[in-house]
Structure formats: C-alpha cells, structure tokens
Image (cartoon, helix red, strand yellow):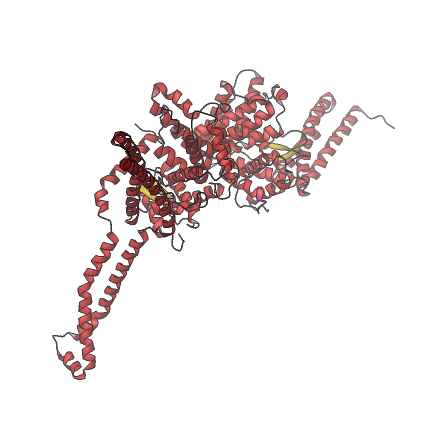
Amino acid sequence: MTHPGELLPLRLTALEQDINTVRAAVRRAKLRGQFIEKATKRIRECTPQLRGLRATLNALNDAMTEEPRIGELIGETSFKLDEYLRDLPDLTKELVGAVQDVADNLGRAAATTVSIDDRSKALEASLERRCDELSNELKELRTKVDTESHEKRREHWKTYEVLLVKARPVFCEYVDFLGGLTVRDTGLDDRVCEMTDALLNRFVGTTPQKSLPLPARQAGLGYALDSVVLLGFPEWSIWGIPLVGHEIGLAYANDQNDPRLVELIRTYVAKGAHNEEYVRQLVADAFAAYTLGFCYACAALLLRLSPRHDQEHRYDEPPDIDRARVIMFTLRAGGDTAPESGGTYSDDVERLGEMWEAAVRERAGKAMADEAAAQAAGPPPHQDWLDDFVREAIEVFRGLRLIRPFDDDRWAGAMGWYEALRDEEAGPSWHPVDDTVPDVLTAAWRRRLFDGASPEELATKVMERWTTDRKGVSR
Amino acid sequence: MPTPELADLLRFRKDAGRARLADLIHLLPYVDDERSANLRVRIEKQDSQLVAQADGEVGWRELEESAGDTGRLIEEVLALVMTGLLREQGLDAGVFDVAEALLAHLTSLAAVPAIALGRTQDMESIDRTRGTVALRFPGARVWELPVLCHEFGHHVTAHLKHIEPELNKIRPLERLVPAKGPERDRRHVEELLADAVATICAGPTYPLACLCLRVPDASGANRTTDTHPSWRDRVALMREVLDALSARSGKPRYRTLRRTQVDPVAGALLGEVPAADARLADLADQAVQTIDKHCPALVYAGADSAIEIEKSLTRRSAVPSGVMPLAVLDGAWRWRLKHPGDDPNSVAALVVAYCRAWIPGGRS
C-alpha cells in the first residue's frame, strides 16, 4: 500500500517510464530523419501531378499560339478543355499545399538540428588539448619501446595500460558527443536538450563558455570537451532538466576563478575527512538550489539521490543524504535572494522535506528508521558544519551579479505558470526564456507532486507549449 | 424657610439622577444609529424606574441601586461617544475604522452577533453583556490591532454555534471550558481559549503582537492572577496552536512561521522558548479541531497576500486592492520585524490605507 507523497512509488513510476522509453528505442530510431522522409514522400506524391499540370499548361500554351487550333480544341471532346480549365485552380491549390508541407517538414528537420558553430572553436580547442596530452604520452611510450631493451617490456605494458585508462574517457566522450548530437538532431530527446539549452542562458558568465547540453549515458561535465554538459539517461525528460544546474555548479567550482569560492572550499576541506572534490560537489548542489530553487530540489531528491543513510564514506564524494541536506538548507536559507517564507513556498519546501525523510526512514527499515532520520537531519547546529557551509556559500553567490537566484519574482512566475497549467490556459510570457524555464519546471513539479498530475501527460503538454507558444521569442 | 422633609430630599436626588439621564440623551446623536436606539430605550427605562421609585427607606435603597446602574450606563455611553468624536475628528488616524471593520469581518465569518467598538484608556477588553470591545486609546495604532482578536476570541467562545442546524443551541467552544472546578481554573481556560481563537484567526501575527507589545519580560511572564494564566503558558499555547494548524491543514507554513518568527522573538524576550505541557497542547489541539469543524472560514490563510503586502510596504507602493485586514496586519508585522530600527509611523498610515481599501465603501 502506498501513501500520498511517498518517494518510492514516484521513483518506480519514473523507472517504468524510462524502461518504456528504452523499449521503444528501435521504433524511435526509425523516426530519425522522419521530417526529411516525409518531405521526400510528399515530393514523390506530387510529381505525377506536376507532370500532368505541365502537360495541360503546354497544351493550352500551344492552343494560345495557334488560333485555328483553339477551335479544334474546343470542338475536340477528347481534349476536355473545359474540364482542365475547371480543375486547374484546385490542382494548383493542392500543389501549393504539398510544397508547403515539404517546406514545413524541412523546417522542422532544420529546427531540431543543433548548431555548434558558435561553440566549435572552444570544443575543438579543448579536444585538441586532451588529444595532444594523450599523443604526447603515446609518443614518449613509443620512443621508449623503440629504444629501450626488451627487459623493460613489462614496464612498457604497464605504462600502456595506464595510458589506455586515461584514453578511455576521451573515447567514450567521442561516442557520447556524436551520439548525443545525433539524438538531439533527430529530436529523439523530445527536445529536452533544446529547453536545457535555453535554461543554460541563465548561467552565462558563470563558466567561461556557454555549455552545450547533450544526452548521454551518465550525467557529468565533458572531460575532453570542456563546455559540454552531459544529461544522463534516464533523466532525459523535463523532470530531469534542473539537474543540469549541478553540473554547471561543478564547472563553476572547478573553474577556480572566484577567490572567495576557492577560499570557502579550502576552509571546509580542513573541517573533515574529505577532499576538495567532495566539497565542490556540495558547492554544486548549493549553487543549483540557489539558482533553480524548488525544481532542482525536486529533481535531485525525487529522481537522483539515494535515501540510504548507510552509504559508505568516500573521501571524494559526499553521501547523498548530506547532499540532500545542503539542498534543503539552501531552500530554507531565506533572505532577500530567496522566496519569502511562511506562505505557499514554505509549504512546498517542507512537504518535499517530509517526503524525503519518509523515504529515508522506509529505506532504512523499521529497526533503523529513527537512526536513519537522525543521520539525514544531521547533528545539532553547533556541531554541524553543513549549515555554516551553506550560509557562507550563499554569501559568495550573492556577491556575484552573474549568479541569478531563484527569488520571489521567480516564485511568483512559477505560480503564474502553475495556474496556467492547472487551468489549461495561456501561460505568462516565455520571455525571457532563461527565467521562464525554471518557472515552468517548478510549476510542473508542483502539479505533479501536489495535484497528482500524470508525469507523462504533463511533460507532453509542457513540451507542446514549449514548441508552439514561443513564437517570436529569440533563442 | 420651611425645613425640607426626607421625601423632598429623596426627590432632589431623583431629579439629579434624571438630569444625568437627560444629558445622556443629548449625547446619543454622537453614537451610531444602531446603538443609539437601543441606548435610548435603556436610558428611558432607567428614567422610568427612577420616577417609579418608592418613598421612604425603600426608596433610598432603590436610589442607591439605580445610581450604580446609571453610572454604568453613563460609562458605556461616554465610551461610545468618545469613540465617535475621536473618529470624526480623525484623532485615531483611521485605526478605529480598521478595528471596526476587522471585528465586523470576523463576526461575519463566524456568524456570531456583531460587536461594537468603544475605547478605553486601559487594556483592550470586552463587555460580554453589552457586546462591545474597547480599544485602548490614547495609543491605538495598527500594531495593536491583532490583540483585538483576543477579545473577539471571548466573543466567539460564547456565541459560536454548532455547524449542524439542529444542534445550533450547542456552543462547541464553550464546551471546552470546564463546567465544574475552581473558578480560577475556569477563567484561565477562557483566557487560553481566547488566545487560541486569536491565533487561529490571525496566524502568527497574534503571538508576535503580544510578544512585542504586551508580554512582560521573563520574570513578569511567570505571574498568574485569578483571572489570567501566566504569559509563559499563554505563549506556549499559541505555539501549540500554530503547530496544530499545520498538522490539521497539512500546510507546514504555520509551523514554519512559529519556528522562524515566533520562537526567536519569544526566546529573545523570555530567555527561552516556552514549551506547552500536555494540558495546553490538548487545549490547543481541541480549539483548532473545533474551529476547523464548525467554522473553517475563521482559520487564517492570508500568508501569501501578507508576503505581497510586506513587499508593497517596503516599496511604499500604492494601495493594493482586495487584501483582507488580517493579511495586511500580518504583512505589516513582517515588515516591522524585518526593519526593527525604522520608524514604524512611516508605514502605519499606509497600513491603514491598505486596510481601508478593503472596507466596503472605504476610501484609501
């Protein structure tokens, strides 16, 4: 038996949808090039009609130039001049319609094709850099193999194996890059990356390059391709879009251009048994929650993070329950850059927190539920470093104009979109789109969580609005 | 000169008493029409009783009794007249209008008899016999208005009907007051219930206004009297009511505001946040359940509007339309707690204007 607001049924539903998506892979693969195929088919269909029209027009043209011929043509019942003249307007109209269909399909094909022109130089440069590193190491190894004695072969093999391990991520990224681009070009990602692309405008300036979102097997930042953000399946849906905030936050933390952030990370590395990578992951969560608010929290807690309280401690990666705690601290931090507490926003944040705590308890089982909940809640404030960390991280974010918080205006925008989705009415403007996307995603999550809206139907409706309502909005 | 007899002296006294009543009649034009008619009847009845009083020893006794009745009648009329004059001259800066509209709104929501607004130079109070609530003046400001909800709480306790029409003789809130037991305990529960109702109607604004304007410091907060429990217990109950509202409604906002606004102020004033014992927790829970069942419209739900009001006050924006007074007062207190060093008078007039915009036929 399930309870409303339970996390596990939500995750099972998401998993079921993901399996169904995978199951339909071949069918969807056939949709590749569908628009071009439709355009081609339409051209084939109307070719005989075009030929017929040409013949008719030729005959009429001949008749126009030879006067006696007109009389013959009118007299000739087999020529059916009156029929041709009567049918001509309709035939022309049909052909014009067919040409329009072709144009539309070609237009759709073009629209889904993602251009990387504005990013190609940066992509090439970063790929070149990584490949150069590998090539140089390869050259060194080859020189050694060519010049050193056979007795050192074992060492050479080991060096080769290490090199292979270094190259593996670059090779995987090659496949992911081309594969991801193809998935985007064919629209097989349901244009989720397109919406993610618009959202990424929100982070322009936070990282040196504007990121290129591509669907991939696992979420993460590009390794060989600096400005690529990989959207991991199964989060290729509107529900997972906010997770890109974490990757951008990670890029921002890794960039090390902000001295205050660098200092913050160093300070908190010193506070525990963990390294910089560990703290950067938490910065990324705080960043994403600060900039994308409730929708990031929903995506992270309800789709990605594990409610296990007993994850093995890792030096370089925080446990998911601590990541969840950072996210919730950020949402509850208050202040001028956050939506005001004590109203609907507070209700939603607390309900989300309750769902998470219930999941932690259930996952732990009855015997360990209280202990698990206590771990998830963290130590008392005077012993806890995460609350101080979040407070200081937010202060760093607040000091930068380029980092845009999910504030009262965004919450008000989200409420407007929530009503529009609920009442199936026209929504507020999509402009500016990088503010509107988090508003819409927040509204969608609210509908899903608190109104029991079907995630598939809602996702379809949101993408329909994304496709059809944004006329005149520059991308 | 003849020596007057005792009966003559009695007649002189009666004439004096009748003169007082005659003067009261002259003051009635300064009282609103609805009250005025009722008061005239009572004054004339008092006068008739004076005239009909016996002579002799019985007459002197009756005169003494009626003097007491006349005195109370005079107090009531003067309070109403003073209120009317203060409002007419604008000496109340519009606060009385808002107070009256607030009470009218609450009594309408609860479907209980209307209560009139008077003034007092003491603390706010309610005259349950006459159905009047006195607002303290001088000193009446918008910040005090949430405290009126406590007096409304007394009124509702006495008059709230059962939701089922066939059971409408039952007063579900009154049933929470023990019928037996020491008088002191009974009166304490009445006060706590009034606090509970006020918190239910006004949300965290009520405990915040009490803590900021009424509750004494830590040592004073522990004092109890024959009529009132300690402020420590009262604040503890208000906290429990907010949590009970969240539990009942499924909306965490009340508990969130208790934690983020009420508790810090309570802790700052009292040294520690007062915790409710089982008795107070139970009373809080019962009060919330009773109101939610019999008059859910009374439960405060204006937090989102209050958030907008706080922003409008910060920007000194023009009057927003259609925001209920309790949400305006909530927003006003949010503003005040965020700007403790600012001059409150700088927004007080704006708060009155926002409230007045809601009053039917009111002007900003």
Using residue B236 as the reference point, say whether residue A316 is left or right of it.
left
Toward which corner of the image does residue A98 lie, by quadrant?
Answer: bottom left
Residue sitting nearer the eye, A409 or A344: A409
In the displayed structure, B156 sits above or below A365; it is: below
Q: Main secondary structure of the magenta part?
A: loop
Q: Looking at the figure, which quarter contains the N terminus of chain A?
A: top left
Q: At 39% from the left edge and 20% from the top edge, which residue is drawn?
A: A371
Q: At 67% from the left edge and 43% from the top edge, which residue is drawn?
A: B88
Q: At 63% from the left edge and 20% from the top edge, which residue is drawn?
A: B219
Extreme residue toward the top, this view: B181
Visible residue check, residue B150:
yes
Residue A56 location, x and y as percent?
18, 72
Q: At 65% from the left edge and 39% from the top edge, which residue is drawn?
A: B345
In the displayed structure, B289 sits above or below B33; it is: above
Residue sitting nearer the eye, A281 or B193: A281
Residue sitting nearer the eye, A347 or B17: A347
Question: Which span of residues is magenta-colored?
Answer: B315-324
Extreme residue toward the bottom, this view: A68
Visible residue check, residue B253:
no
In the displayed structure, A65 sits above or below B87; it is: below
Query: Is residue B323 in the magenta section?
Result: yes
Toward which corner of the image does residue A294 lie, by quadrant?
Answer: top left
Residue A122 location, x and y as percent?
38, 47
Residue B133 location, x and y as percent?
61, 32
Residue B269 location, x and y as percent?
60, 25
Using residue A74 as the reference point, say whether residue A473 is left or right of it.
right
